[in-house]
Image: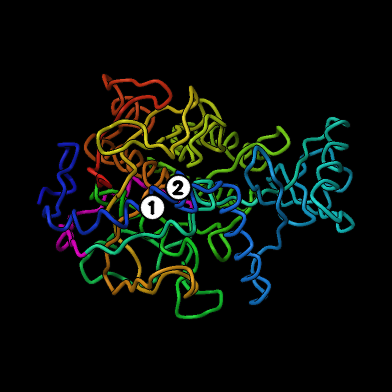
Amino acid sequence: MTSPASPRWPLPDPRAPGQIDQDRPAVRAQVSKLTSPDGRGGTPAADRIGVVQRMIARQRASGTGTPFDVLMQNNRPVLIARHELVVGAGHESYQAADRPGRKVRIQRVPDAQDVNRLLAEAKTLRDQEISANVNPMVPLGYVIKGDAYPGLTSVALGQFPAGAIDPSVRVAIIDTGRFQGDRGDGWSTGVEAKGVDLLDEVAPKNRNDFFAGHGTFTAGVVRQISAACEIAVYRFTGNDGLGTDTAAAEAMLRAAADGAGKRLIINASFGVPAVDGVPPIALRQAVEDIAATYPEVLIVASAGNDGTDEPIYPAAFGDLVRAVGALNPDLTRAGFSNFGPWVDCSTVGVGIVSTFVPGTLPPEPDLGPTIVFPEDSWATWSGTSFTAPQISGAVAHLCTQAAGLSPKAAYTQLVAGRAMASGVGAVVHLLPGTDPG
């Protein structure tokens, strides 16, 4: 195989044709779920609500997670942390409870009986020129795609060709954390767990939760493209891969502080739409603070999997973030990928192969055929969650090859001269993906 340090992109597919054929059905199912989530031509909203209801029932049964309510917006469910507003400086109780150095805080509104009341409270504050809105739950890649499960592949990329890790270049992955075990094949080399993915926190035990392994898979994507950078995987999520605007923002700020003095790329394979016309307040403040305090840090974020031109944040925060969409293996736009002038670049996001975690899917036995992932497993997965880390990895690779090259300058170098396509930005071909057939 070609070394992951190779600058010859796209990297070749390590799978034999027979293995690719075996992987196609799982990839086909993922794409079907992402483009028509029930896989039978039903409405995306109905299917997503079904997954949300399962998550709510799981949390209630286990007594874990952040309670949330559901707001229907543009025919899609948006999840809102119950009784919580995010407010900025100027609110009457802001100073009493705020953490030093932070410019937003959570304000509890325990008497808000539903989301509409909470939205009304937020608007009242905004009418007083106080930055305020609900605290949205932030799914990974913004789509309730928990039932677009990764597929087990028997491919193995061999023992990781480990060399010296360059401590001056780091990719910080804001995600589910990293599986705490080390892989026997060496592909976890240089991947630090800044948060641990416990895999099966919600009953039934011995079955991986929704989104378990997402951070490990994302780290494996970066590592395939950049063999020499540091990788640090942070956890902002609770169980079933759900975090909040404030938790994601805190993780990004922590990653920026931890990476001070390094050439740092922050990878955000998550996103949320504006709620009631207001982009997520905590994430906006975090992105702005990072840009002001660490101007050379590059933030790369997934564009989302709704197949619309609706902006998803943090990807759509203008020049402060590089938004990455998804392409099919033939370099046309993947049907599930969000698109629009706010998308900076795109790369293949269908049937990506990467490292995965041990365990059993789906999270509940009545959701589909049982898939058992062994130790040191590899999987196929689809979505813009896995296009952002390709760009992050490519930028990191360029930085490790040129002393003093900043991540922002490396990104400019990466996309220079690339073909541009309407709605997807620069076309950057890095990993081969899998044609679902």
Q: Is residue 32 above or below residue 275?
A: below
Q: Position of residue 322 (x, y in %)?
A: 45, 32
| 203 in relation to 350, above or below | below
Residue 260 seen: no
Q: Quadrant of residue 81?
A: bottom right
Q: Position of residue 96 (x, y in %)?
A: 84, 52
Instruction: Let me know if residue 168 is in the magenta part.
Output: yes
**Is residue 373 rendered to the left or right of residue 108?**
left
* Coloration of the structure image: rainbow
Tell me the magenta residue range. 154-174
Q: Residues within 10 Å of mark 2 (few under 14, many from 20)?
A: many
Tag 1 and tag 2, C-beta contact below 8 Å:
yes
Let me know if residue 430 is in the magenta part.
no
Q: Which residue is mark 1?
A: 30
Image location (x, y in percent) of residue 47: 56, 54
Label 2: which residue? 34
Q: Is residue 322 left or right of residue 272?
A: left
Q: Residue at (59%, 33%) from the top-left corner? A: 288
Q: Is there any visible trace of residue 93 in the rendered image?
A: yes
Residue 85 vs 132, above or below: the answer is below
- Residue 393 lies left or right of residue 205; in this view the side is left
Query: In terms of secondary structure, where does tag 2 sit?
Result: helix
Query: Which quadrant is the C terminus positioned in?
Result: top left
Q: Tag 2: residue type?
A: Leu
Front residue of 107/271: it is 271
Q: Could you tell me which residue is drawn at 84 percent across and 30 percent down?
A: 129
In the rendered image, residue 325, in percent from the top left (x then y), is placed at: 41, 35
